[in-house]
Amino acid sequence: MENKINTDSITFRSVIDTDLEFLYRVYASTRNEEMAVTGWNEADIENFLRMQFNLQHTYYRQNYPQAAFDIILIDGIPAGRLYIDHQQDKMVVIDIALLPEFRGRGAGGRIMRTLVEEVDKEGLLMSLHVECNNPVRSFYKTLGLVEKGTYGVYYYMERSRPEV
């Protein structure tokens, strides 16, 4: 039997300054495969990832000042991050990521389905960027997100507003 997570066990709380190290670990975990083929030593990888994390974190905070930056908790344990920007006519999923030990257990899918329900209820468009080689793209397509273009190594995807 698959280890699925009960929807009730997924909660969120706002990011606070003391979460930065945890957020770095989440970010770094999304780059493991990429870093494994660089040939760099561990110190160089860590220095590079910390620099990239700091740049990304600063960019998100500056460019999405009204966004909700949340820690995903599974059974009360910090498991990942969810960054959402609610704009006037759309919801931008800035980032969703889970630590490796929480991936493939259903939490990410449940969170995304809940967000789709929310945008449908509010009549909003949903948008996000996903890396071109990320297998989650196919799941996003099942949620009604459509690839609208590319931006560097990312696909820009949108889910249209529901018909009224």
Image (cartoon, rainbow, N blue to C red):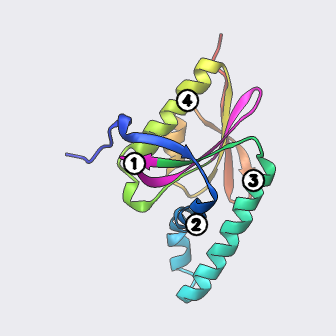
Residue drawn at 69 percent across, 74 percent down: 51
Q: What whole-number distance in Å separates the C-alpha atoms at marks 4 and 1?
A: 24 Å
Residue under pointer 3 = 61
Callout 2 secondary element: helix
Toward which corner of the image does residue 53 lie, by quadrant? bottom right
Q: What whole-number distance in Å separates the C-alpha atoms at marks 3 and 2?
A: 15 Å
Amino acid on which the number 2 mark rests in the picture? Tyr
Q: Nearer the viewer, mark 4 or mark 3?
A: 3
Extreme-right residue of the structure: 62
Residue under pointer 4 = 116
The magenta span reads: 73-94
Instruction: Name the one closer to the observer, 54 or 91.
Output: 54
Callout 3 secondary element: helix
Residue drawn at 60 percent across, 51 percent down: 15
Callout 4 secondary element: helix
> Callout 4 environment at 10 Å: few (<14), some (14 to 19), or many (20+)?
many
Residue under pointer 1 = 76
Image coordinates for residue 83, horizontal then vertical, percent: 63, 46
| Residue contact at pointers 4 and 2, CB within 8 angstroms | no
